[in-house]
Amino acid sequence: MWESDAGLLARVDRDKMPRHVAIIMDGNGRWANCRGLLRSAGHTAGVKTLKNILKTAVNLKLEALTVYAFSTENWKRPPSEVDFLMHLFSDYLEREKLEMHQNNVRIKFLGRMEDFAPSLQKLMRDSVELMKNNTGVKFNVAADYGGQDEIIRAAQKLACRVKAGELLPENISAQLFEDELDTAGQPPVDLMIRTSGDLRVSNFLLWQAAYAEFWFTDTPWPEFTPEEFVDALIDFGKRTRRFGALSN
Ligand code: IPE
Ligand code: IPE
Ligand code: MG
């Protein structure tokens, strides 16, 4: 089992925890460039941060953690960087899957998957299979993921059901739509964190973050710590969420 930092965990009021936290893990490249390193060194450092944050999420018994690993737009990067990211992703999964399993993590992938190498697709499927009965943190890794692409895929699946005569267009509800998303069955995003200073959503979880609270930090992802993660959770606990109604 992963050891826990009791002092850190004690800072969080369990009654005010978000159920679902999403993170845009940004700034690996800039972090590396500032240090005279290659962008790839930033991505490698970022993997270490991810491991620490997942560990903290496990120890806090967070219900769901979704991280943005590779967007549908990230294919526009130089082939050498895309290739590096693919290898890093597969090394990470290969190395960490057993330990995640031992910590009761249930991994899931959000996104398209089919443009990845067959060996990586197999590793992804095997990891999901290994952890499918786990009951701890729902750990969603968004890879070749775009919020618009996910919504289009959901619309296509519903259109097929309408075409097959199984569904009437007027019966398409928010619930039926959600059931076709990659996050089906999971709670909506309560808190969205973005590291490294940019104030945008970059096509992440467009449907699921409809009422998310946002938390931005200038800290680049390789320097993001469990302490700062806990700061974000505590700040979330102080927010008033009205969901369009009036606060009492
Ligand atoms: C985030 O860091 C990781 C991925 C998008 C894969 P970046 O690679 O975007 O780093 P910056 O934003 O260029 O610094
Ligand atoms: C978002 O970061 C995608 C991931 C963190 C995987 P980007 O660095 O790709 O986003 P933009 O290009 O700054 O919007
Ligand atoms: Mg970036």
Image (tube, rainbow, N blue to C red):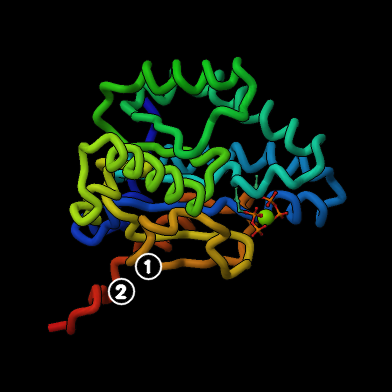
Q: Is residue 180 left or right of residue 217?
A: left
Q: Write down which quadrant ligand 3 falls in.
A: bottom right
Q: Assign the C terminus to one quadrant of the image.
A: bottom left
Above or below, comparing residue 50 to residue 234 in the picture: above
Q: Is residue 14 left or right of residue 34?
A: left
Which residue in the protein does label 1 denote?
A: 213
Q: Looking at the picture, how far across and down is residue 91, in whole percent?
A: 62, 23
Above or below, comparing residue 206 to residue 39 in the picture: below
Q: Evaluate if marks 1 and 2 touch, with contact meaning CB atoms under 8 Å apart.
A: yes
Q: Is residue 223 left or right of residue 104?
A: right
Kind of residue sitting beneath label 2: Arg
Above or below, comparing residue 3 to residue 142 in the picture: above
Q: Residues within 10 Å of mark 2 (few under 14, many from 20)?
A: few
Q: Residue at x 73, y 36 (%)?
A: 82
Q: Residues within 10 Å of mark 1 (few under 14, many from 20)?
A: some
Q: Is residue 183 visible?
A: no
Residue closest to the eye, 164 or 121: 164
Which residue in the protein does label 2 denote?
A: 239
Kind of residue sitting beneath label 1: Glu
